[in-house]
Image: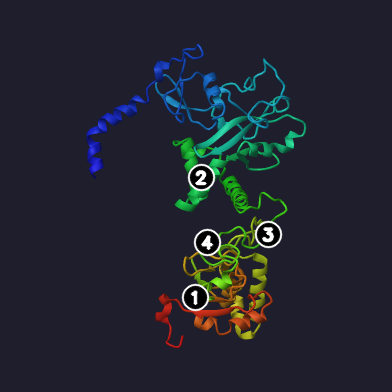
Amino acid sequence: NDFLREYLPWRNEYLSVLLELEQLINNGKYEDCGQEEGFIRCLSCSGEHSWCSSCAVKAHQHNPFHNLQLWNGKFYESTTLWDHGYIMHLGHGGHPCPNVLQQSNLSPWSDLGAMEDVFAHMEGDTIYETQLGLSNLVIVHSTGVYSHCVSWCQCPGAEKDRHLHLLKAKLFPASITRPQSAFTFDVLDNFLIDALECKTSAMSFYQKLCRFTNNAFPHTIPDRYRELMRVSRIWRDLVNRIRFGFAHKSDRSPGPGDLALYCPACPQPGINLPSSWKDTYDSWLVMQRYVVNGNFTAQHMKMKTPEDDVSLADGKGYMVTEGPYETHIIESKSSCSNHRAVNAANVKRSNLRATGVGATACARHGCFVPHAVVDFQKGERQMNMDYSICNALKYPSEDIGSALIIYDVACQWSIHFHEWVNQSYHLSLPQSIKILPAVGKFHLSAHKLLC
């Protein structure tokens, strides 16, 4: 409140400064190139600058995602680099391709007439494609959605590598065969951080970018929502593989859980334990300590065409591999007549593919165990949790001979656990491991003294 009281006497002065920033810069004079009309300003550049059309393009040759404004005689209105003839060169480090025809009298804008809204042109239309290799490309950046004239490389065989030319320019193509849209690396990183910290959906994030581009008429901006959903998945997959060291050697591929992080403080032989840990520490000190629980709000609806779904990292992260897990669930369903009604209920379970998830995490720090999160088909059943627990006990646990399993129904679960493991083809445990079941203190009030 003290800061707000301090602001009140300065309110009118602040308003005056903001209004002064809206006046014509330097009375519209620009002397650097000998022209007097400096009617263009940039909202993204620091300081006050006024340019003519050609100088604005030259100043932003390597800043294509700055927001420009043009003085119309009364006030500044939005304009684009496209309007002033900006061309983005791809394939030669930002320089024009030497194989492009040099025609001094040929302008790519000669047949366009008066420039209208750049997004009004049919997306992907080519301009002198055969001669200059120019086309329209919609580029999504963290400051808005832009349409640029792109000059593609005209070297022999370069047409098939256009998506790679975009990638080398830090523009991720929305398609491979004939890219017409691209996303900057910056906007993809922004989306991942927004989704993580702000829980922003892809639709809300893209609508924000549309508002940045045209706050009055956001519906006039090209819709790239589906492309954002697809490209962000690919970007996340690539970034994960680089971070976990699977990009530097092409002959090395990730295994189950290799694209996920585990608790750095829990004992892991070969990672955070010395080679002589067996002689240095007591066995109880190096015991694995896990907590098991389920979440019934993480539901997954059935897909209309599940056969079209493409998995980029099946079983490589925290979720278990889908195929073996589904086989385990099918074989674990009882064939006894007394349980057929239960099995039938699983098939007719409304429109949900998964009614929740179950996971195993370290008991001390709450970090999920990689490749140990499972889907629930009908509530939290022991066949689901058995699969999660077995996978967790096999995760970097070499030579660790004991494990503490804290489970709210450990008193019932532990009775036939080893029996179910021995009967199942898909369940296994490390050799000679001792399991100590326990009930968490939070759930003790619902248990008897015998538990």
Residue 384 appears left or right of 98: left
x and y, in percent, of residue 159 in the image: 73, 35
Q: Residue 118's mark?
A: none
Q: Amino acid at mark 4?
A: Pro
Residue in view at x 70 percent, y 19 percent: 102
Position of residue 109 relative to residue 10, above or below, is above
Label whose residue precedes the other's in the sequence (3 or 1): 3
Horizontal side of 319 relative to 450 (left or right) equals right
Disc ID at residue 190: 2
Residue 391: x and y, percent? 61, 70
**Which element is circle 4 on?**
loop
* Residue under pointer 3: 307
Verify CB contact (< 8 Å) between mark 2 and mark 1. Answer: no
Q: Kindly state the secondary structure of the residue where label 1 is placed.
A: strand
Any part of residue 348 in sight: no
Between marks 4 and 3 in the image, the one whose residue lies nearer the viewer:
4
Q: CA distance from mark 3 to mark 1?
A: 38 Å
Instruction: Please identify, in this view, whether the residue under mark 3 or under mark 1 is nearer the observer.
Output: 1
Task: Name the residue nearer the viewer: 64 or 85.
Answer: 64
Dot 1 amino acid type = Ile
Residue 423: quarter of image = bottom right
Q: Are marks 2 and 3 in contact (CB under 8 Å)?
A: no
In front: mark 4 or mark 2? 4
Image spot of residue 1 (x, y percent): 24, 45
Mark 4 and mark 2: Cα distance apart in space: 27 Å
